[in-house]
Amino acid sequence: MAITDYSLKELIQTGACTNCMLCAEVCPAVSAAGDGHLSGVYRLNVLNRLYRARSGFFKRFYKASLNKDFLKGFSDTLYRCTLCGRCEEICPSGISLKDIWISLRQDMVHSDAFPAKVNAIKENVLKSHNVFNEDNSERAEWVSDLDDPPEHGHIKESADVVYFTGCVSSYFPMAQQIPMSLVRIFDAAGVDFTLLGEDEYCCGFPFLGAGLRDRVDEIIQHNIEAVKKKRATKVVFACPSCYRMWKEYYPPEFELYHVTQYITRYLMDGRLKLKDLGRVVTYHDPCDLGRGSHEYDAPREIIRAIPGIRLVEMKRSRENCACCGGGGNLEMIDAALSKEIAGAKIKEVLETGADTVITSCQQCVRTMKGYARLNKIKLDVLDIVELVSKSLKL
């Protein structure tokens, strides 16, 4: 364990907590589990004790109580978090809580007090270059399911745009309609794009959530070189976590776009012709696109551009949107808690009266659609690129 796992800003901000408890009130994990030990205020309290146990006059008073057994138990609560950022959004002290949670997880890894699943995440990504330990040469196998796949499989020697698909959309059948739909949109708009195929590695975001931040550099360097080889100037993401990872941790060598930002231009200039769909929809703001990347408007502009669509907002939307339960590696750490959070999300969706919930994240689609199917709830769950694809006049 080391104070060096934290930035100076984080060390200073930790002492700014006023114990107002607002973070606990809005935390989806606390609400679903009914456990205050999952709250931000509890974590900060423990973190302040850790600081004192590691240095200064109070060291001898705290060190005994913060032994290995305590840290193991604390770590279990720390990883039962979706890293949704709702606590940070509401914090009146302006504490950068999500950064602190990532540093705290790294601290627990360095302290050898972390869930066993962390090792699985590390081994999968380092060995197979994806978080699911699938054959990385099969990243673009979904292309074969397109109606008329090209001979090059959308893996070209060069292109202006690289579509960085992400692990979930590459391997999960429930999410593979997202890249397939995006290919149809790109083709309709005349976008010169390529996939990286097996040269695409996990973006590294799962490493942050696992507490393995100090292992991401080799992944970043590989992906940067893979895009350079394509002579691309732009990288487009349908995955908000991949997008945020590249924006915050990768060197600024390319133009980066979430797909909602990128295809808006083609809707506005008329290159994408859309037909009437006649649906009542609500929109779920993905945590890493909304609170994480402050993109709330582009998805709504797209939805409103589709004829026959009526958008009704949930009681909590935009920066207040409730998490779906799919982030922060929670599904791997505590699948039952992830489902409880998803259940609360679906309940809120149903309260709008909408027949369809739209999001802009493959993991949100997988989490919400999985819950709806398991509980036989009549609700369509679509990624926004699926919605646009369905409305295309071809």
Image (cartoon, grey):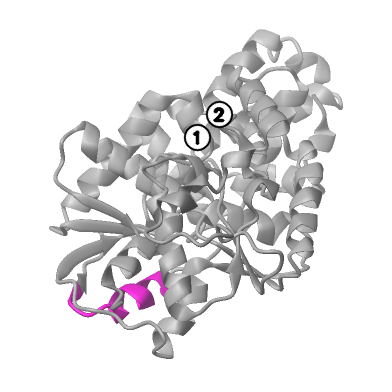
Residue wearing tag 2: 79
Amino acid type assigned to the residue bearing label 1 in the image: Cys
Which quadrant is home to the C terminus? bottom left
Q: Residue at x 34, y 67 (%)?
A: 389
Q: Nearer the viewer, residue 379 or 226?
A: 226
> Please, is residue 215 above or below residue 229 in the view?
above
Residue 316 seen anywhere in this rendered image of the structure: no
Q: Secondary structure at mark 2?
A: loop
The magenta segment is 297-309
Q: Kindly check if marks 1 and 2 are in contact, taking CB atoms under 8 A apart as contact.
A: yes
> Which residue lies under the disc numbered 1?
81
Q: Position of residue 352 (x, y in %)?
A: 17, 58
Q: Reply above or below: 326 against 59.
A: below
Instruction: Locate residue 351 relative to residue 54 in the image: left or right.
Output: left
Tell me if 45 is positioned left or right of 81 in this view: right
Residue 205 percent coordinates (x, y): 63, 44
